[in-house]
Amino acid sequence: MSDLGTGEPLLRTAQLIVENDDVANTLELPRLTSRVDVIREICRHLAPYQAGERPIVGETIIAKDLTIDSLAIMDMVMELEDSFDVSIPMNVVAEIHTVDQLADTILDLRAKR
């Protein structure tokens, strides 16, 4: 590698990160979130409201298929907003019925940031 006239060889990025751990901590890249991660987190929040042995899946209708009330739904949405660093407008929340729709909304909002 060239030395840019300093007499010191250039280091690879990986070496710089290892040698400068205190700086690397401040250079966090935005974490990519997969659809699976989002659905897993939603299901984790909905697990206490699972009705019987029916698994919570993408097609699960949140207010109908689970034993969750509207206040608990709003609390869950606020926790998910914090977890994924998004803000879901109230009019959009009103249109979300399934786990898939909630996951899509979160992913769409993250993509727009």
Image (cartoon, rainbow, N blue to C red):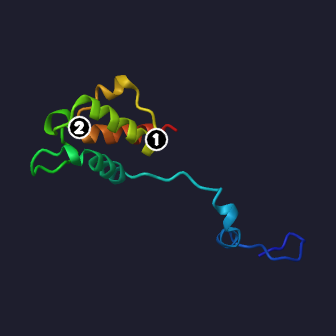
Label 1, label 2: how far apart the Cα atoms are: 19 Å
The crowding category of the residue bearing disc 2, from other C-alpha atoms within 10 Å (few below 14, some 14 to 19, many at least 20), is some
Identified at 28% across, 37% down, the residue is 101
Seen from this angle, which residue lies furthest top?
91
Nearest the camera: 72 or 82? 72
Q: Secondary structure at mark 1?
A: helix
Amino acid residing under circle 2: Thr
Identified at 33% across, 42% down, the residue is 103
The x and y percentages for residue 58 are: 22, 45
Position above or below: 67 against 18? above
Amino acid residing under circle 1: Arg
The crowding category of the residue bearing disc 1, from other C-alpha atoms within 10 Å (few below 14, some 14 to 19, many at least 20), is some
Position above or below: 57 against 87? below
Left or right: residue 25 compared with residue 9:
left
In the picture of the structure, the residue carrying the numbered disc 1 is 110
Q: Secondary structure at mark 2?
A: loop
For the N terminus, the image quarter is bottom right
Quarter residue 18 falls in: bottom right
Which numbered marker is on residue 98?
Answer: 2
